[in-house]
Image (cartoon, rainbow, N blue to C red):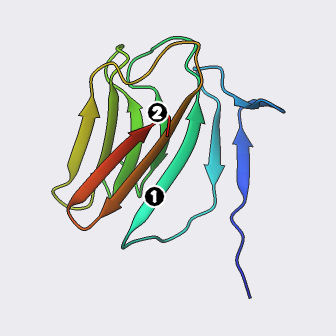
Amino acid sequence: MHNHLQAHPINSPTCSSNGISLDGNDDYIDIDDFEFGGITSFEVYVKYDSFNYHSPVYDFSNGVNSDNVRLNNFSEKSDFVWYVLPGRGFSSSVDGGWNASIWTHVIVTVSGNSMNLYKNV
């Protein structure tokens, strides 16, 4: 038997053939709980209209600073920040990684203590 994750829209994000559009205020998608580990990767296409304070692309966690896996911009800048926080945690950042109003393809991977971030591959 295969389990399938369900995504639940919260606070009325809009969906179209272009993807999911979030208003930057309180919209988000809640995904069913799931466990992962070992070699892991996440892939997204993102288009920021503007850069707000630490706007997450995704944030999987068990609460504040508890087993977080997060990809966002830094402060109100276009810098990538990607981190995994199991216990002491580790992170990776790229200056100027995001471009406003342009679709960006991002793949992030983690394996043991190694993290990689790929842009537009």
Q: Could you say where residue 30 lies in the image, as x and y percent from the top left? A: 63, 49
Question: Going 74% across and 88% down the picture, which residue do you hit?
Answer: 1
Circle 2 SS class: strand
Instruction: Residue under label 2, please give it.
Output: 56
Q: Which mark is residue 41?
A: 1
Q: Is residue 7 visible?
A: yes
Distance from the alpha carbon under mark 1 to that under mark 2: 17 Å
* Residue positioned most to the front: 121
Give the image quarter of residue 41.
Answer: bottom left
Q: Earlier in the sequence, mark 1 or mark 2?
A: 1
Q: Could you say where residue 46 lies in the image, as x and y percent from the top left? A: 57, 30
Question: Going 59% across and 36% down the picture, which residue do you hit?
Answer: 45
Question: Going 48% across and 71% down the picture, which residue do you hit?
Answer: 35
Identify which residue, 10 or 102, lies in the foreground.
102
Left or right of residue 81, residue 43 in this image:
right
Q: Could you say where residue 64 lies in the image, as x and y percent from the top left? A: 34, 47
